[in-house]
Structures are given as structure tokens and as C-alpha cells.
Image: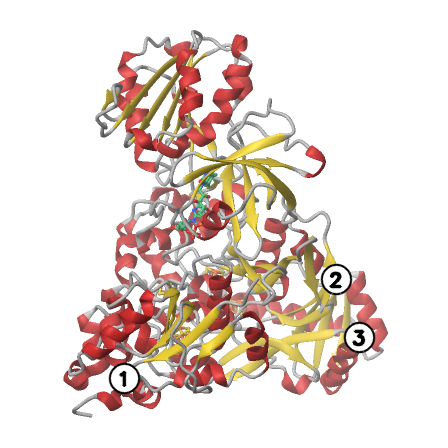
């Protein structure tokens, strides 16, 4: 079987997710045996204009030029993967949208909510059809590999629709609520193996919300523990360079 | 860490070969499967197997052929998600993992000598087909047999050729209805309950078997109860999410019952007090 | 009844000697007042006083993630992974939890993965002289006293640890380490005193007799208590994942990068999760979070009574500790008791 032609494209983002992949180390070599990378700006400079088996899109869409460009890529790609929070949920602004519960968003983003609203940003699937999502800011490398396998086997990849707490508990972590800090794990969809908590940080919700969060219950909990929401903002700033596009930022 | 091969494990899977594939509709295909050495599956009508595509997963699928069929068995599969999609991508000569059969099938012995009303809605025809085939192959052992089918539109009707054969037989009464007719449809229009009043039922000797989507049961059972059919003689096959078939993973649980082991076939008197059942 | 005495000064020698024979797992402090069973090599790592660990020792009998099958393009093999080990310091509530799981997994069709691992695990219990914290309800659930299910069982005194030797395996450990003294009448009377004092501390935590809990659950299926939980529960699944008697699982395939070989594994699953009972076609048989909470409680206090003739709650309190929504098992039971008074009460 010919190796599928894969290209990476970046839109508005920090390219941190591509960097994650470039930094994969050993597993990257195994993956490269399965695919043929024809465009990857982070590590290559050539441009490829032919038909693609797989297009991997990083970054959110926020100019008319970008809209035309992504449509062009979609037209010549059999499979399209949105990679990283900027692409899957529109980055910082999208993360806010991914929390459809306005009250929670207000709790989370507090006085900064106007700052987050100022970017007109779209996630990739708001513009073209997306076949696979790799959420996260940055992406969790093992999940990227799992998605790639699903692509190569031509089966769908289901993003977990249960919260980060599940993975966190299975890893036996001391809960952040027991350390006196708020954590968005209970309402954020899993798939990252709760790696922030494993590394001593809270979950700041970078993968977006589960499909049916308990709005009222979440607010009760956040209200009861809601001391340290600025942590969440700090995390976002640390990871999410997308905000550099923000005219007010 | 030590790893040991577990021959007796109930998670062990056999490799089945796809002998034939027939496309029934845009979403459903019929797979004829042979086990190694044409071993018999040894199932009861109404039982199911775990069907695997390795690397993708396993899905519970009803065996839709009668145990009277030797050498191979049939699976009719609707493409709805990961595993079923991967199964649809397979070709004749390809292989599938088979585990089972599991569950309690239709109480064939009890049905013998009695009149049967077999009622299927939508994909419910799939598990019911194994019973219909069994009954037809042993027709003399049963009393009056009626088959009532319902589906949303005529083109969703599965096993059209076979149903045509049932329809032609003098020893089964057959009726069929659709929710929405197409121009070329000359049959009944209306939900399946409308077919039931037309039947001359002798409650003491009538067993009704119902398989269909969750919403169907309440109405059909209500109609049968109006016809004085005893609870014990109303038989349903329930669908639940299933991951093991062994009464352990918990997905199929209906209060204190495990659909995969205690069912999927239940007598109505066993579940009528169980609020989560219907 | 055989007892053996280990002077505290020799505790470390004991753990080191045991660890030379096989892996030793024991409660270890994780900070913030929490503990977890982990592999230890010396007694200094072990917390002898600890509240129930974040995850119960269940994780050694039924690991969070466990390979059950391996396949290549031409072979399919069901497998079991196991590690011979000794678990030191299992509280009586967790011994009861393991007893529940033993029943579940030895029932037909038997689960050989569980049973192979069980046969490779030595269990050394540890007595609680006092409550771990306010979330425990072990007295009500009759699991505060040792009730079998161990090879050795330790009661701690100021100068020594008293070991109850319950099985030949336990006896072999005592013999092979050569660190123990035989217990005499004075040791046994100290134990009797200890138990007497313990009985005055552990009192059934709620105003209901253990046997009446099942009757309560016969009456409260439609209770409004579940509606209230529907509003509060976040469906995070923590209460399932920390429970010593929850055993639901999911089965997942993981192909290797060659895409033709790989493994099938089972992973703990939770009935509180949105997707747990959803089927193709979109029907979700427990869509309501309150119905899912109810299901969890019925799986502790009602359904297993019908099947195994015992409650599947050990009173360990983990579910209450792990719930960021403050849903506490004792409070829920109390609400049910108040809302549905029993006739004979
Ligand atoms: C006893 C029984 C007999 C069945 N017989 C047939 C049959 O003969 N033909 C047929 O086409 N289908 C049958 N089904 C349904 C079939 O099992 C599901 O469609 C299949 O499991 C979906 O798997 P998937 O990986 O393709 O879908 P997924 O991608 O996993 O998910 C699609 C949807 O199916 C649900 N689902 C996932 N796994 C299961 C599961 N194990 N059980 C039920 N729902 C699930 C998901 O929650 C989701 O809503 C039967 C189900 C049961 C319980
Ligand atoms: S630390 Fe966060 S993710 Fe982990 S269990 Fe607690 S709330 Fe959930
Ligand atoms: S733990 Fe939360 S913030 Fe961290 S990667 Fe996972 S979803 Fe994102
Ligand atoms: S731990 Fe609490 S919030 Fe989470 S599922 Fe259980 S009861 Fe609900
Ligand atoms: S239900 Fe709660 S208290 Fe009872 S055994 Fe499970 S975790 Fe412990
Ligand atoms: S619940 Fe009871 S037996 Fe368990 S640790 Fe607490 S006091 Fe000990
Ligand atoms: S399918 Fe696992 S318990 Fe029924």
C-alpha cells in the first residue's frame, strides 16, 4: 500500500501543536514509516500543490483569505483533521464558545470576558467539513497517534464524551478540590489522560466541554470553591499564543 | 509483569470467514459467516454474538438465521458507527472475530403447539428472522402463525425477497405496514398497532413475540393486553448497550437484570414491574 | 486461632524480607491528607495510619486498564497479565470490598483474568482502632471488624504488631521471615481490650438497621431525593472510580502502529457517565443524572442483595470524599430514611 500523502497547514496559531509533533522523538520515526509528509512548515520548506490523502490543519480561521485557503485545502484533501484547540474550538475565543454555558464562562473569564470576545475567530469545522478532531492546547501526542491510526484504518475516531476526572481518577491523583483549588476537569471532555493534573496543574478546560454538562451543578461547585479562577486565565495565557492576534492584547 | 495465555477466557474470540455478502439497503448488509471447520455456532433463535474487527472493537449482533441452517450463519448489520462501519468495509473471504453465542433466546419449546403472533418493527426483523425461519422450517409443530411487520418507509423494509416468500405461503398469515407510504406502495399505512385488531386471537393459546425500537413496545404490549393475551405469553427482545455479554460490564443492566444474560428475550411478566425496562 | 507478634523495631525487617519474596504494595502518603496503595521496599514508606486510599486495592485485582486479548494478522489469544504480590495494610472495609468482587468474578461465566490475579495476591489486613474520618459508615455496613478475606491481619499496639494468621500462606510468611514471636495470653487479652474499646467507638452511623436498608430501597425508587441529585451531580464518575465494589468496564481495541496487530483491553467504566447506557439510534436508557445516581445506589443497596445476598457498600466513604459536588452517601441515605419512613420504625 502506498503511504498516504499528509500535509500540515497552519492558520492563526502558535504552531505549538506542530512543535509537539516535531518533538515526538522516537514514535515519530515509526509514524513516518506509515505516512509521507509532503508539507510540514515546522520542519520542511517545500510546498506541495497536488491531491492530499490527509490534511492536518492547525490554527483558527480569522480572515477572508484564510477562508479561501482552507476551502482550497479541503477540496484537494480526502481526509481533513483539525488539530489543536485553535483549530477544533477556535482557540481562546473558541474555548469560551466551547463553554456554551454563559454563566460558567463568566465565572471562568470574569472581568476579562470582553477581552476574549474581541477576536472574530472561527474553528475549522465552522468553515469546512472536518473528519477528525484532535483537541487540546497543546495536543496530547498519544491521542494524535490514536487519531492517525483511525484515519489509516478508515474508521471514525470518537472524542471521549466523559470528563477529564475519569482519567484523573484512574491515575490515582489527589483531586485539586482536595488541594483547595478549582479544576475544570468535571466539565471538560477527556482524551488527554488528565496530563495537567498529573503534572501538578489544574485542568483549565482546553479540550472544550462534554456534550451535556450540568450547568447548575457546575456553578454551585465553582461558587463554593471559586477562589482561584485566575489560575485558569493564567494557564490560557501561557499556552495560547493565539491571543497575540488580539488587537487589544 | 507476567503474561499468560488464557484458553478458557470468555473474551477469547474465534475467527469467522465471510462467505457471502448481500447488500440489503444503503445502510444494511447481510453477512454469511463460517466458523473454522464449518463448526456449528449452536445458537438459539434470538441469541446474539460479539462481532469483532480487530483494532476497531466488538459489537453485539443478533444471529439472524435459524439454527436449522448448517455450516454458516447470517448476520444483518446496520452501519451506524465505528465497528459496524468497519464491518461494512470488509469483503467476501475476509474475516471477522466471533464470540458467543450469548443470552437467552426465544423460548422455542414453549412456543411449540401454540399460535404465534410475531411482530417486528424496523431493524427488529433481524433477530426475529431467526425465529421465523425456525418456525417455517418446523411449521407442523406450531399452531396458527401470523407475522406482522412495520417500518417507517417501504424502502426500509429488509429481506424483501424473503418476505415475499413468507407472504406467498398458505400456512402463515402475513401483514405489513409503513408509517409513510411511497407512490408505488399498495400495502397498509399506519403504525404497527393498527395491524393487531385484524387478528382473530385465542388468548389462551397465543404467544406474541415483539422486537423493535424502544418506543414500540409500550404501544404494542398495550394492544395485546387489550386482546387478553396473558403477560407470560407476551415475549419481547430488548436492546441495550453491551460490552461483555457475560453479565459483568454493567452496560446492559436493567435494574437487577442483565439484558445480555437474563435476556435479551424476556417474558412480559418478568419485566412489567421493572420501571427501567420498557 | 494462631497469632504471632512482631516487635515494632522489626517491622522494617519484615517489609524488606517480604519485598525480597514478592512485590509489596502498601498505603503511601500522597500529601493533602490523601493516600494511595503503591509498591514499597521498606516500612518507612508505609503509612500505618491512613484514611481509605484514593483508589481501593481493587486496582490490583481488576486493574484500571487490563489487556484481555492480543492479536496479530494470524493469531488471536486471550491473555491475562499478573504480578505475584502482597498487599499490606488493607482495612476491613476494603477486605469486604474484595470479598464482594470475589463473588462477582467467580460467578459463572467465570472471569479467569480476575481469578488468576486473585490467586497471585497475598492479603495482609490492618485494623482500624478508630474512625478514619466523618465519611465512614463501616459500622452500619458491618465491615468495621475483621471478617475473613485475608492471609494475615495486623492489629497495631504501642510496642508491637499483632498478626492474626488466617491461612497456610500467612503461616508460611511468618515462618519464612523468622522475625516473629508466638503470642501468649497477655497479647490476646490486649486484643480483647482493644476490640471492646473499638465497639464503644464504632456505632451504626445512621438510625437504621443494616437489614432494613434493603427494605428502604424497595420503597424509594421514585423518590424525589434522586431529582435533587439530578441537579447537583456533575456526572464525573469519581464516585464509581473510587468505589471498592464498582466493577463496570468498557472494552477497547488498541491497534499497534503496524495496524494489523494490537491488543484489546478493558478499562474501568462508570454508570454515572452520559454515554454509559446510550445505544445506536440515540436512545439513552439512563439519560437523567438522577436516574444514574439512583442506579448507583441501587447497585450498592438493592440489586446485589437479590443476587449475592449482601450489600455492595463497605461504608469506606470514598465516594463522599471524591465528590466535588458534596454529594455524601450518609446524607443521601439519611434523606431517604426521612422521606420514606419504614412502617416498623
Ligand atoms: C442484543 C443486541 C443485538 C443486536 N443486534 C443487531 C443486529 O443484528 N444488527 C445490527 O445492525 N445491530 C444490532 N445491534 C446494535 C449494535 O450492537 C450497535 O449498533 C453497535 O454495537 C454499534 O457499534 P458501533 O461501534 O458501530 O457504533 P459506535 O461508533 O460505537 O456508536 C454508535 C452508537 O451505538 C451505540 N453503541 C455502541 N456500542 C454499543 C453496544 N455495544 N451496544 C449497543 N449500542 C452501542 C453508541 O452508544 C452510539 O450511540 C444489537 C444490539 C444488541 C444489544
Ligand atoms: S483534579 Fe480535577 S480532573 Fe482530577 S478528579 Fe479532581 S476535579 Fe476531576
Ligand atoms: S487536563 Fe484539561 S487543560 Fe490539561 S490538557 Fe487535559 S483538558 Fe486540557
Ligand atoms: S462524584 Fe459526585 S458529581 Fe461525580 S458522578 Fe459521583 S455524585 Fe456525581
Ligand atoms: S458506595 Fe461509597 S462508601 Fe460504599 S463502598 Fe462504594 S465508595 Fe465506599
Ligand atoms: S471506613 Fe471503617 S474500616 Fe474503612 S478505613 Fe474507615 S474506619 Fe477503617
Ligand atoms: S453486556 Fe456486559 S453486563 Fe451485559
- Chain ID at mark 1: A
Frontmost of labels 1 and 2 is 1
Q: Characterize the local packing of mark 1: few (<14), some (14-19) or many (20 or more) Cα atoms within 10 angstroms.
A: some
Instruction: State the SS at label 1.
Output: helix
**Quadrant of image for the N terminus of chain A:** bottom right
Query: Which residue is tagged 2?
Result: C166
Picture disc at residue C21: 3
Q: Residue at x 42, y 75 (%)?
A: A7
Q: Characterize the local packing of mark 3: few (<14), some (14-19) or many (20 or more) Cα atoms within 10 angstroms.
A: some
- Chain ID at mark 2: C
Frontmost of labels 2 and 3 is 3
Say if A154 sits above or below A101 in the image. Answer: above
Q: Nearer the viewer, residue B212 or B106?
A: B212
Q: Nearer the viewer, residue A148 or A164?
A: A148
Say if C209 sits above or below C18 in the image. Answer: above
Instruction: State the SS at label 2.
Output: loop
Residue C49 can be seen in this image: no
Looking at the image, do the residues carrying marks 1 and 2 touch, with CB atoms under 8 Å apart?
Answer: no
Q: Nearer the viewer, residue B132 or B201?
A: B132
**Quadrant of image for the C terminus of chain A:** bottom left
Q: Residue at x 36, y 83 (%)?
A: A180
Instruction: State the SS at label 3.
Output: helix
Spatial CA distance of label 1 from label 2 is 52 Å
Query: Which residue is tagged 1?
Result: A229
Residue C13 image position (x, y, % from top left): 77, 84
Q: Nearer the N terminus, badge 2 or badge 3?
A: 3
Residue B123 image position (x, y, % from top left): 39, 34
Amino acid at each position: 500500500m502506498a503511504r498516504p500523502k499528509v500535509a500540515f497547514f497552519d492558520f492563526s496559531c502558535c504552531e505549538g501543536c506542530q512543535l509537539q509533533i516535531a518533538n515526538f522523538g522516537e514514535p515519530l520515526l515509526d509514524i513516518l514509516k506509515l505516512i509521507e509528509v509532503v508539507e510540514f512548515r515546522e520542519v520542511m520548506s517545500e510546498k506541495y500543490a497536488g491531491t492530499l490523502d490527509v490534511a492536518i490543519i492547525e490554527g483558527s480561521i480569522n480572515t477572508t483569505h484564510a477562508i479561501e485557503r482552507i476551502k482550497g485545502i479541503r477540496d484537494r484533501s480526502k481526509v481533513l483533521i483539525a488539530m489543536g484547540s485553535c483549530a477544533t474550538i477556535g482557540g481562546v475565543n473558541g474555548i469560551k464558545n466551547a463553554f456554551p454555558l454563559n454563566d460558567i464562562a463568566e465565572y471562568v473569564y470574569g472581568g476579562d470576558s470582553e477581552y476574549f470576545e474581541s477576536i472574530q475567530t472561527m474553528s475549522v469545522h465552522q468553515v469546512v467539513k472536518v473528519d477528525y478532531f484532535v483537541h487540546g492546547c497543546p495536543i496530547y501526542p498519544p491521542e494524535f497517534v490514536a487519531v492517525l491510526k483511525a484515519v489509516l484504518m478508515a474508521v471514525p475516531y470518537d472524542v471521549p464524551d466523559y470528563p477529564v476526572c475519569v482519567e484523573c481518577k484512574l491515575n490515582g491523583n489527589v483531586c485539586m478540590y482536595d488541594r483547595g483549588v478549582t479544576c475544570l476537569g468535571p466539565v471538560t471532555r477527556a482524551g488527554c489522560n488528565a496530563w495537567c493534573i498529573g503534572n501538578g496543574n489544574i485542568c483549565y478546560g482546553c479540550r472544550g466541554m462534554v456534550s451535556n454538562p450540568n450547568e447548575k451543578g457546575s456553578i454551585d461547585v465553582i461558587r463554593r470553591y471559586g477562589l482561584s479562577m485566575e489560575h485558569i486565565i493564567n494557564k490560557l495565557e501561557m499556552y495560547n499564543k493565539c491571543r497575540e492576534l488580539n488587537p487589544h492584547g | 509483569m507476567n503474561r499468560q495465555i488464557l484458553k478458557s477466557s470468555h473474551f477469547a474470540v474465534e475467527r469467522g470467514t465471510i462467505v457471502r455478502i448481500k447488500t440489503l439497503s444503503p445502510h444494511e448488509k447481510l453477512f454469511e459467516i463460517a466458523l473454522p471447520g464449518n463448526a456449528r455456532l449452536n445458537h438459539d433463535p434470538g441469541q446474539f454474538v460479539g462481532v469483532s474487527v480487530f483494532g476497531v472493537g466488538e459489537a453485539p449482533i443478533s444471529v439472524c438465521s435459524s439454527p436449522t441452517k448448517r455450516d454458516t450463519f447470517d448476520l444483518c448489520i446496520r452501519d451506524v458507527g465505528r465497528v459496524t462501519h468497519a464491518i461494512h468495509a470488509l469483503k467476501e473471504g475476509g474475516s471477522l472475530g466471533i464470540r458467543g453465542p450469548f443470552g437467552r433466546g426465544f423460548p422455542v419449546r414453549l412456543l411449540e403447539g401454540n399460535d404465534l403472533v410475531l411482530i417486528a418493527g424496523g431493524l427488529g426483523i433481524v433477530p426475529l428472522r431467526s425465529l421465523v425461519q425456525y418456525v417455517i422450517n418446523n411449521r407442523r409443530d406450531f399452531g396458527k402463525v401470523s407475522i406482522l411487520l412495520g417500518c417507517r418507509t417501504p424502502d426500509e423494509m429488509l429481506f424483501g425477497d424473503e418476505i415475499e416468500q413468507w407472504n406467498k405461503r398458505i400456512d402463515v398469515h402475513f401483514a405489513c405496514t409503513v408509517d409513510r407510504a411511497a407512490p408505488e406502495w399498495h400495502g397498509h399505512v399506519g403504525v404497527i398497532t393498527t395491524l393487531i385488531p385484524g387478528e382473530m386471537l385465542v388468548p389462551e393459546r397465543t404467544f406474541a413475540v415483539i422486537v423493535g425500537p424502544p418506543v414500540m413496545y409500550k404501544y404494542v404490549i398495550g394492544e395485546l393486553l387489550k386482546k387478553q393475551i396473558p403477560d407470560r405469553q407476551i415475549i419481547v427482545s430488548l436492546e441495550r448497550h453491551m460490552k461483555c455479554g457475560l453479565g459483568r460490564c454493567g452496560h446492559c443492566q436493567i435494574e437487577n437484570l442483565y439484558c445480555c444474560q437474563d435476556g435479551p428475550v424476556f417474558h412480559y411478566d418478568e419485566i412489567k414491574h421493572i420501571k427501567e425496562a420498557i | 486461632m494462631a497469632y504471632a507478634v512482631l516487635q515494632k523495631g522489626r517491622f522494617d525487617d519484615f517489609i524488606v524480607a517480604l519485598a525480597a519474596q514478592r512485590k509489596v504494595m502498601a498505603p503511601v502518603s500522597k500529601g493533602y491528607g490523601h493516600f494511595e496503595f503503591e509498591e514499597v521496599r521498606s516500612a518507612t514508606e508505609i503509612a500505618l495510619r491512613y484514611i481509605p486510599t484514593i483508589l481501593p486495592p481493587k486496582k490490583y485485582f481488576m486493574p484500571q486498564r487490563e489487556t484481555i486479548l492480543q492479536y496479530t494478522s494470524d493469531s488471536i489469544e486471550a491473555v491475562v497479565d499478573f504480578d505475584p504480590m502482597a498487599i499490606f495494610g488493607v482495612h476491613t472495609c476494603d477486605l469486604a470490598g474484595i470479598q464482594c468482587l470475589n463473588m462477582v468474578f467467580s460467578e459463572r461465566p467465570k472471569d479467569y483474568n480476575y481469578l488468576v490475579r486473585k490467586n497471585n495476591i497475598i492479603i495482609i489486613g490492618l485494623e482500624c482502632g478508630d474512625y478514619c474520618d466523618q465519611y465512614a459508615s463501616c459500622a452500619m455496613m458491618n465491615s468495621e471488624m475483621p471478617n475473613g478475606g485475608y492471609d494475615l491481619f495486623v492489629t497495631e499496639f504501642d510496642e508491637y504488631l499483632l498478626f492474626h494468621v488466617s491461612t497456610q500462606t500467612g503461616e508460611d510468611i511468618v515462618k519464612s521471615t523468622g522475625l516473629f514471636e508466638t503470642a501468649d495470653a497477655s497479647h490476646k487479652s490486649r486484643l480483647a481490650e482493644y476490640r471492646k474499646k473499638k465497639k464503644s467507638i464504632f456505632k451504626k452511623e445512621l438510625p437504621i438497621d443494616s437489614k432494613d436498608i434493603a427494605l428502604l430501597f424497595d420503597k424509594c425508587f421514585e423518590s424525589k431525593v434522586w431529582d435533587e441529585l439530578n441537579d447537583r451531580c456533575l456526572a464525573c464518575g469519581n464516585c464509581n472510580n473510587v468505589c471498592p465494589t464498582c466493577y463496570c468496564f468498557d472494552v477497547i481495541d488498541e491497534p499497534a502502529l503496524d495496524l494489523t496487530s494490537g491488543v484489546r483491553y478493558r478499562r474501568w467504566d462508570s454508570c454515572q457517565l452520559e454515554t454509559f447506557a446510550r445505544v445506536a439510534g440515540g436512545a439513552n436508557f439512563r439519560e437523567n443524572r438522577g436516574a444514574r445516581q439512583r442506579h448507583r445506589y441501587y447497585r450498592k443497596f438493592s440489586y446485589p442483595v437479590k443476587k449475592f445476598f449482601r450489600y455492595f457498600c463497605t461504608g469506606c466513604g470514598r465516594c463522599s470524599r471524591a465528590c466535588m459536588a458534596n454529594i455524601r452517601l450518609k446524607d443521601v441515605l439519611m434523606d431517604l430514611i426521612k422521606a420514606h419512613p419504614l412502617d416498623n420504625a
